[in-house]
Amino acid sequence: MTPWTDRLAELIAIRSTADRPGELARALELVIGEAGPGFAVRRFESHGKPSALLRPAGGGDELRVILNAHLDVVPAPDEQFAPRRDGDRLYGRGAHDMKAAALVMTSVFRAVAARLAYPIGLQLVTDEEVGGPDGTGHQLARGVRAGFVVIGEQSGLKVVNESKGICHARLAATGLAAHAAYPWLGENAVLALTAGVGRLLERYPVPAAEAWATTVNVARIATPNHAFNQVPAAAEAWLDIRYPPADPDFEGRTRAEVAAHLGKVTGLTATVAELGPPHFADPAGPGVVGLRAAARSVGHSGDLLRKHGAADGRYYHALGIDAVIFGPGGDGQHGPAEYVDLTTLMPYHDALVTFLRDYRP
């Protein structure tokens, strides 16, 4: 049993998905309450997504260190919001990504923030799983700054100083409607769409194993059809593209330039809904060095790690601020068997306390 187990079970039971603004607010208020009294709480809201920045009373928002945690989760069946413990594993949606880390970070903040010789903040957001523009992105647009940022995404107490960029795009194809019994009288937009997707996957093939390369996930293919017996005149695909800094097709490009590139490769009409840059933090910087040493002090390797998934660190990287991912152990995030390894929570807590105590910004 850890000090956070019961509270974590309560937090997991809150269905804090993007389509439930009331539950996002409930999760946020629960964690703010865990921080306790005596802190200044600056509240934000953008497009219905609430967030908060906690800091010791007095002073401004230019903080030396920010602990960043998101409280939103991806959708899941009902049973995943009923947390279940099996030995040292606590299962449930958000257990690993990242409600356990949020509670531990809040506990650390409560214990040390007022005693440090420099100002730190606790940043709580509720939209990371849908890109982060209304949480971390919005707070930075409103002037929040830090010298170094620790994001509590899952990492097994390794230090993620590099992660891929993200592109969410749509491909559209048009055809000619006809009766399905006479397909030669029409032009099937789905066939044109899948042919274009095939050309894209030839350029960016799905790796057979983990690889630091650009990947394309086809998340959805849809048509406006409501009948079996109609040749579709339109079709659309959703793409989730992750790319490393070395890929010139995406790195440093604008949305319009990436859309033009995707259109050229596929022969289809492409639009880019989101384009987030890769993230990188200097491995020789004092924040990264100090955090790795703190991880080693609690018996973990503190190794550097690359992460294929994007996180809110890219918003800080775009402003020249080093941000890393550093979180507890577990597995199965976004899947049916997501769990947090409870044995890693206390070492995670102690590593953060050690880092903040020894850090000399």
Image: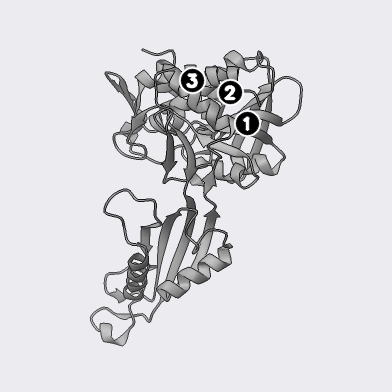
The kind of residue on which mark 2 rests is Ile
Q: CA distance from mark 2 to mark 1?
A: 8 Å
Q: Is residue 199 left or right of residue 35?
A: left
Q: Earlier in the sequence, mark 1 or mark 3?
A: 1
Residue drawn at (55%, 35%), measured in percent from left and top? 284
Whether residue 123 is visible to the viewer of this picture, yes or no, is: no
Circle count? 3
Residue 194 location, x and y as percent?
33, 70
Q: Earlier in the sequence, mark 2 or mark 1?
A: 2
Q: Mark 2 sits on what residue?
A: 32
Residue farthest to the bottom?
Answer: 185
Q: CA distance from mark 3 to mark 2?
A: 22 Å
- Helix, strand or loop under label 1: strand
**Pointer 2 and pointer 1: residues touching (CB < 8 Å)?**
yes
Q: Mark 1 sits on what residue?
A: 52
- Helix, strand or loop under label 2: helix
The kind of residue on which mark 3 rests is Ala
- Helix, strand or loop under label 3: helix
Whether residue 344 is visible to the viewer of this picture, yes or no, is: yes
